[in-house]
Image: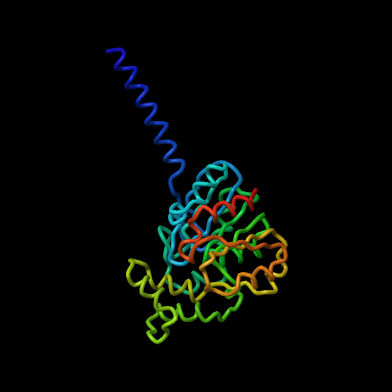
Amino acid sequence: MKKLFICLIIFLIFISHSTSAQEKNKGQYYTSFDSTRIYYEVMGDGYPVLLIHGFSGTSQGWKNGRLYGDLLKAGYKVIIPDLRGNGLSDKPHTDAAYANDAEAKDIMGLISYLHINRYDVVGYSRGSIIASRLLVLDNRIDKTVIGGMGDAYTNPDWPRRVHAYRALMGDTSLHDVDDMIKYIHSQHFDELALALQQKYQPSTSKAELGRVRKPVLIIRGKEDKGDGSETGLMLLIHNSKLTYVPGDHNAASKNEQFSEAALSFFK
């Protein structure tokens, strides 16, 4: 009987410790500058690395690739937020909620909330567009990986952005974004929130990028041909280098070569 009681106590202690670890690592919410709630997760205890997902994605997408787990194994603290309008974050339906670098401000506020003084960033696809805003707005950044993006976003009137917004608002005459719109219609997305993200998607000018002196790695899939020129983007950023990995736009960020390139750059 005594032996059974001791075993029960040990089991309860184990469950308590396991629950505490789960509570520590599960997602939480940060209330941003305009009261929008931003969902985020933090894992690990080392040097902080922020991962920014792409258009219509969520923080959880990083867990489907190699980089998230490899960063944790290498001893980094990994921060993955859902950008406003996506995932478990709030999805406001006002223009003001997405204008004037709202998404970058969310991240900078979250970094302050977490008491982080220095950090690295990985953006992919639209996440790279937001990462570029952080590059020029937040001097706490050390190194930045820009994945799956060329120089097209430096144009404030980038046709793809404009057409995506118009198509999401119901314009059926713009067929260059048909694949994107078909996918979005097939899912349970908040389409107005996505439309507003496109309407107010920031562009970082060539002049702004030319003033960046922080180390930048541009990673591009060998079969990824959209969103402008990656070599053109590299030429705009003085302290940058370019590397290619296997895959198209949807696959490149998930493979081991992408992870290896990012980890080597950070080290």
Give x and y (percent) for residue 162: 49, 80
User: For this rendering, which residue is in front, 35 or 154?
Assistant: 154
**Location of residue 16 (image quadrant):** top left
The structure residue drawn at horizontal position 37% and vertical position 31%, both measured from the top left corner, is 15
Relative to residue 174, is residue 19 depicted above or below?
above
The structure residue drawn at horizontal position 53% and vertical position 64%, both measured from the top left corner, is 221
Relative to residue 217, is residue 179 depicted above or below?
below
The structure residue drawn at horizontal position 36% and vertical position 74%, both measured from the top left corner, is 182
The structure residue drawn at horizontal position 43% and vertical position 67%, both measured from the top left corner, is 92
Give x and y (percent) for residue 214: 70, 59
Residue farthest to the left, as pictured: 1
User: For this rendering, which residue is in front, 52 or 237?
Assistant: 237
Instruction: Give left or right: position of 5 versus 249.
Output: left
Query: Which quarter of the image is occupied by the N terminus?
Result: top left
Number of numbered discs: 0
Residue farthest to the top, as pictured: 2
Give x and y (percent) for residue 24: 46, 41
